[in-house]
Amino acid sequence: MRVLGIETSCDETAAAVVTEEGVVLSDVVRSQVEAHAPYGGVVPEIASRDHARAIVPVIREALARAEMKPGDVDGIAVTSRPGLLGALLVGLSAAKGLSFTTGKPLVGVDHLVGHLLAVFLRRGEAEAAAPVPSYPFIALLASGGHTALYRVDAPRLSSIRELGATRDDAAGEAFDKTAKLLGLGYPGGPVVDRLAATGDASRAKDVVPRPLAHRESLEFSFSGVKSAVMRHVATLGKAPEGQALADLCAAFQASVVGTLVDKAVRAAKVEGVPRIVLAGGVAANRGLRARMAEACARQKIALFVPSFASCTDNAAMIAYAGALRLAAGEADDLALEPSTKTAL
Ligand code: KG4
Ligand code: ZN
């Protein structure tokens, strides 16, 4: 089965063709980052307009790279939730049009389910033999819009249970807001990651608290870390520069990453499931990957980390999640509606 996936929930216009085994035949991602950067965050109206401009060329390219015509696909999967309503509508309308004209089944996918299953994607030779987790597994999903821990018993909505989520900012949001405070542009996660690698967290550890909230709880809270950086910048009168900036980034990242790692390991223990899967844009963070690998090795937990391309927003994960729904005999009709909320 070869499924076309379409993703327009936020600021990436993406299309991909993937098999139900997770083999990625094509994967096109067109980022809108440059359009939103001057505003320091995603502007919904700009996102919708940009998706409308990009959607047809992006779908055309994904099909061409897979050497397929629209009628060659076995189904059309599209992100129907959660996301910006106007942005979702563009992908959904394109998917409905394709389904209507080709007669191929339409299947809506929850963006978060896509992230949780992205670890199963196989991109080329290198990933063909990479180990994949068995079910159940614990997933840490950390992106710009969501941060939560899940227990995934099977690849379908009804078999995924949230164990704890953030009470305020998502981890990626904390990275982006902190980067903005430090004058590092948007999106700031990758920049903070780069600077943190040259910094010494111990030299700024008094500035940034460790947001442990309740040790027992599996909930997160990241707004305090961001506020601490804000107070520090206010005291200095400006953002630090040079080594002091790198040290602050390192301390901020160590704090956020430390919490993510602690809670994920705790979830694995509480659930008695010795398998952790990383998901979402923040899973691209090198500090998180390194700390999580250390902690899992110590605790004898198997860790599964998707490739960078599978962590950040893409349509391959949507196509794969959709292919599994189709393989299970599920589909949606053309009345499928978008929603700003996840179904998880
Ligand atoms: O999953 P994603 O592409 O989009 C959402 O669904 O939100 O995640 C984007 C988020 C942004 O907040 C971005 O700053 C963050 O992931 N991010 C990172 C890194 N790469 C992307 N955060 C920390 N370190 C990174 N290397
Ligand atoms: Zn996402």
Image (spheres, rainbow, N blue to C red):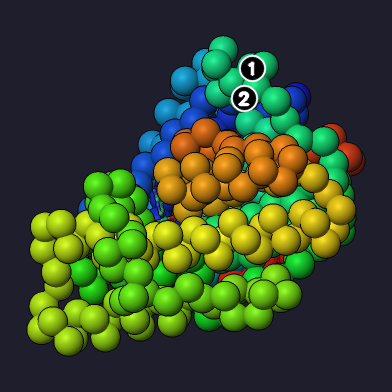
Query: Circle 2 — which element?
Result: loop
Residue located at (55% from left, 16% from top): 126
Q: Residue at x 65, y 22 (%)?
A: 130
The residue to which callout 1 is attached is: 128
Foreground of the two, 31 or 40: 40
Give above or below for 97 relative to 85: above
| Apparent side of residue 249 relative to residue 161 in the rendered image (left or right) | left
Residue lying farthest to the front in this orientation: 202
| Quadrant in which ligand 1 is drawn | bottom left
Q: In the displayed structure, would residue 208 be above or below residue 316?
A: below
Residue depicted at 51% across the width and 43% down the height? 289
Name the image quarter holding residue 104. Answer: top right
**Residue 164 visible in the snapshot:** yes
Q: Is residue 35 left or right of residue 156?
A: left
Q: Looking at the picture, how far across and down is residue 275, in whole percent?
A: 76, 43
Label count reads 2
Q: Residue furthest top?
A: 125
- Where is mark 2, residue-wise? 122
CB contact under 8 Å: marks 1 and 2: yes
Residue type at the position of mark 1: Ala
Foreground residue among 230 and 20: 230
Q: On screen, 170 above or below 273?
A: below
| Ligand 1 neighbours mark 2 (CB distance < 8 Å) | no
Q: Nearer the viewer, residue 293 or 92?
A: 293
Q: Position of residue 96 (x, y in %)?
A: 63, 49
Left or right: 145 with respect to 41?
right
Could you tell me which quadrant the C terminus lies in?
Answer: bottom right
The spot of residue 5 in percent (x, y) is: 60, 39
